[in-house]
Structure formats: structure tokens, C-alpha cells
Image (tube, grey):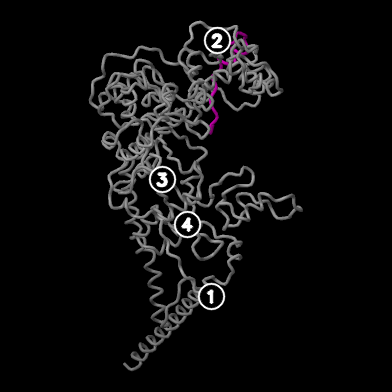
Amino acid sequence: MLRNWRVLARSFATTASEEATPKVDISFLRPRHRIIAAGGIPPVQFDSERERAARRERFGRYGLASGVPVEELFPTAEEIEEEQAIGLFREFNDVKKEYNELQKKKKEAEVARLAELEKNLKKYPAALAKYEASLVKQEREKDDKELALEKRIREIQEYFGYWMDPKDPRFEVMLQQKEAEEKKAAKMAKRDEIQKKRYAENVQ
Amino acid sequence: MLTKAVMTSLCATRQAPVNVAARGIANIPAHEYHIRFDQRVGRKRPAQDVLDRFKRLNNGMWIHAHPGRHKLKYMKDETWQKTSLYYETCTKEQCEILDKLMTPYWLRQKHYPNDPYSAYHVRHNINSPRVDDRGNFVRERKKILMDDITSQRFFPDC
Amino acid sequence: MSQALRSAKERAFQIVEKASRIRVQDARDNIGARTTGRQLKKGHNQMGHTQGALERAAKPPLGWIWGDFFRPWQRMYPGEKLFNADINSRREYIPLSLIELARLIDLGWINPSRPIDVSALCATQKFQINPKIRQYGFDLTEEGADSFPYQIDIEVQYATQSAIAAVEKAGGRVRTAYYDVESLEAAVNPKAWFEKGKVIPKRKAPPASLIEYYMDAKNRGYLSEETEMEKERQLSADVRGYVLPDVKVSSALKSIDQVFHGIPSGSVVSLADKKVFAPKNELHREYYNRQVSDKLYS
């Protein structure tokens, strides 16, 4: 309790006795840290402090009094050249131009497409009618052309008794066979007719 | 949780060179995909299998696609054709396990401007507590300087 | 200070105050609180292995259900590229709703008479923007748009149409501006940036994928024309049915390459001396005058 009273009294003392006992620093801080704790600028001691980044930080913390010239903070000519040589970033004007061209192309394509659609829309009724007509004609054509084929197929079927695919090579052979037989039959019939007539004449 | 195997591997001395390929993130057996300490950094790694197949919504729910959604479509009916492309939610246990397989970055709430999943980052009518032990919202987004009444009026979050 | 010197009673009171009303489920056990041991069918309650063998064996992976070691359940679902494949090219924005902005102004965290930009919002320390994980700034959302009372001059990185309309209805001004990663780092914590002695970077123009957004007057992009902007302001007022107030924000806009108001880019700020240093020679002047576009997937 007595110790605290003495400290309290010292803090409120109006007559400061500076020539009294010098203040002993018992913090065990290193000189560098003592300077920092007192708010001063520590001298450059370590190799790591001589690096570019460390010097930049030194200027950032302590300003002009740090001893770092302002010019060091800016990129050097070599660095600027290197950055431009790498070419990672493009010029904004180029990008903008490209973008504008792209937009123009898109708009033109849209306009062209709309015009094409308009044109086709005008032609649409005619095209539709034509298509429907072609459908109808196809049916009639079918009747005209395929009727004969179907007749032949039917005759063969009836004559021979089984169905034969018209694409089959035997179809033609059978057709010819059938025609030959029919001719023969017709010839025979004709001969019979003539004979019958002669017979009839003879009889009479 | 440091298993004995992991401890021995971390403290191992230099061994004879082995012909087996290095145990990178893609070259580990499937039963060891939960990497608690990776070789180089010593930090947890997210399971790449999980990242390829699941998506985490901001409210903690994980969704996945339906297996076989592109297979044998010709012999499946209309309902299947529609529902096969839906995403499905995971069960509570599955969500907990998937969260454990992830690193903190993947468990953060992320906000994107034109997010197609924006409507699904909120959940409604859940009775479990809204805050965790640290006072952060569990399923909702963080509201700056806002009391419950005002936030419930303006944010359709709970 | 008030956070440190709380007595145990006060802390307990705070916890109870913040807790929700007690319900039956609060009295229920937490998961894993009680586990009944199970009896394995093999001898000595061990599946054919000794205690030591079981301890030293490889443990099954997390969530492994009895089955194939090489086909865990996490791999039995099909892959979906839309989920996470583009995580390294996605741009994340911090959501800032109008009601939160109004709250910040109400409680004095933000001064509405000064222009509000990323630096002002991050100075409140209520938001954490980390440019390293692809966060690109703020997204102004429309919660609280119906009753936004303040006339403000705000610059964000993304804004919804309703939010823009609400701010303009109250007589304010909205701009969307692009900050590339380096400029955003400087803007988010200017003090740290200046104390590192770094030069204030020149804000790069948006990459080709974003240039469309920032050149569009509908989004009040900072690269669009003033005349277009006026037209769009009138248009949104007509569409949404409110009257544009006559009072206009008069403070100057930032130029396209500026990061901080009133400080030209390419200069060095010394906080200790309270001075700003700008380069005088031609090479650096030209370097800081060229307007350059950011990389596509920065």
C-alpha cells in the first residue's frame, strides 16, 4: 500500500525533480525496439531492409524522414519495358473498338436476318400452294405410272400362285415366260379358231 | 485427428526412391480422399470427387444430379424425361459428411449477380435455430446492423 | 473496451438475452450425445480382429457405407460441370441491400453528403472484401427499395435495375464501375496500401467479357455516354411510374482510371508527411496515361 502511495504522490507532484535519480529502463528492449517504441525511425540494419519492398514500406511508414527517395517507389524504366513486352494487358481503345465492331456485326446480322424473314414471309403463300400441289400431283402420277406395274405383278401372282418381288431378277424371267406362254396360248387359240372356222365351213 | 499412419509419414526420414508415381491429389486411392493434411502445405484439401458431382447452396444444402439421366432415354416414359434433368437434394447426414470433406472456402456463402440458383439459397419453415454458437446465421446471409423484425420484413430468408 | 470488461454476470445475461425462446427441441439431446454400443456377431465382440489390429488398421473413409472400398457413395453420382467447374472464372460480389445502406447512414457509419464508394463502404469495417478470392466489389440489391429516403452519390460494381431506380427516385446518383484486382486491394484498405509505400495503381478498364455491362447506360456503367444515361434515367422513371426529382448531385465523378477521389492515379501518398507525390518525367507520365484493359479472366 505504501509503495502505491509513493507512486501516486510522484505522479501528482507539481515540482518535478529531474536532477533526481535518472529513469532506468528495465524493459529489456533492444536499442532498435526502444527507438521504435519511442516513436522514432530505426536505422537500416538488416539485409532484408535493403530490398526494394522493404524500402518502400520504410517510406510508407516514416515518409521523407526515412531517407528513401520518392523516385525509388515508382517502377523503373526496365520494369515498365518488361511489362509492355509481356503484353499481358491490351490497350483499352483496341478492346473498345473490337467490342463496337462486334456489336455492329451482331446488329447487322440481326437486321439481315429480319430482312430475309420478311422476304420469305412474302413468298410463303405461293410456296405453300406449290408444295400442296406437288403433293396432289404425286398421287396422280403414282396412279398413272405404277398402275401398269401393279397389273403385271397381279397377273404374275395369279398365273404362278405366289408373290414375287418386282426387283428380283426372276421377275423379268417369269414375266417373259408368262408372255411366251400367253403368246403360245394365243397362237393355239387362234389356230383353234381358224380350225373351227374351216370345220364349220367344211361341215356346211 | 492424427492417425498413426499420418504421423509416421510426416516424421518419416528419407527413404529409397520408389517407382510409384507421387501421391498427388489425383493419384490417391479412393478410400483416402478425405485429406486432412496435404503433403506440401499441411492444410486440408477439398475432395475433388465431391466438387465434380455436388453443389453447395448457401444455406448448407448440397444438390446433385440424377444417376443415369442420359442413359436409355428411348425406353423411359415422359415423367422420367422431365424429372431426370432435375437436381436432387442430399440427406442431412450426406450434407454433414460433404461439409466435412470441404475446406472453409467452399463452406462460405457466395453471392453472384445473375445466379440461376439465387432462389434456392434460402430455406423456409425450418424450426432449428437460426444462429450458431458464435452468433452467425446458419442458413441465411449476414445482415448488417439489422434486427430480426426489419430483416424479416425485407429479406425473404427464413 | 466495453467488450473486454464484462463481468461473468453480464456475459451470461447477454447470452440469455440473445437466445431464442426455449422450446421442447432445445431440451432434446444433440446428435451423438448418447450412443448405445452395439454387439458384433463375431466372437469377443470383434469382427475377427484383435483390438490392436483394429486400432492399427486403415480406417474407412468419411461416410463410408459398407461396400466397395473403391466406389464410395460420393462417386456414385454423375458429374455436373455447371456446379463448380467455373469457380476460377466466376466473379463474386458482396451483396449490399438498400435497407442495409439506409441503416448504415442512419447510424452514422456512412456520410451521405460525401460520395460513397468501395473505400467508404469498406472503411465501416462491416464488409470484408478479399480481391484474392475473386471478389470484385459490391452488388447493390433491391431489398428496401420501396422506402429509400436518402439522396446519395454511390459507386458500386454491380447494381440491379430496381436498386438503381430506387436511388434515383430519391434524387441520388448511381454508377457502376470496374475495379481490377490491384485497384480493389488499394481501395479496400487505403491505409495499408499507403503504409506499404505502393504507388496508387491506375484502374484498368474492364476485360472484354465485362465491357458490355459497363458500357451500357441501363446499368449506369461508368464507360457509357452521359446523354444515354439521361435517357435511361428518364426511361426508368417513366416505366416505373415515379417523377425524377429536379435536385441533382453536383459533385464531380471519378475519372475512369482513378481509384480515390481527388488523388490522381500514379501518385504516391505519404501519410507521415501528409503529402502526395506525382511523377514528373515523361516516361512515367505516359505510362500512367495509357488506358489499359484488364486480362480476360483476371
Q: Farthest residue in the right direction?
A: B16
Secondary structure, mark 1, is helix
Q: Farthest residue in the front direction?
A: A2
What mark, if any, has residue C77 been given in the picture?
Answer: 4
Q: Quadrant of the C terminus of chain C?
A: top right
What mark, if any, has residue C43 been given in the picture?
Answer: 1
Q: Does label 4 lie on the same chain as label 3?
A: no
Q: Which mark is first along the chain, 2 or 1? A: 1
Residue identified by numbered label 3: B57
Question: Could you tell me if residue C40 is visible in this image?
Answer: yes
Which residues are drawn in magenta? C277-298
x and y, in percent, of residue C57 in the image: 60, 62
Which amino acid type is shown beneath numbered disc 3?
Answer: Leu
Q: Which mark is first along the chain, 4 or 2? A: 4
User: Which dot, 2 or 4, sits closer to the camera?
Assistant: 2
User: Which dot, 2 or 3, sits closer to the camera?
Assistant: 2
Chain holding disc 2: C
Residue identified by numbered label 2: C273
Which amino acid type is shown beneath numbered disc 1?
Answer: Gly
Chain holding disc 4: C
Judge whether residue C286 is colored magenta.
Answer: yes
Residues tagged 1 and 3 counted as in contact (Cβ below 8 A) = no
Comparing A50 with A42, the one in front is A42
x and y, in percent, of residue A184 in the image: 45, 83
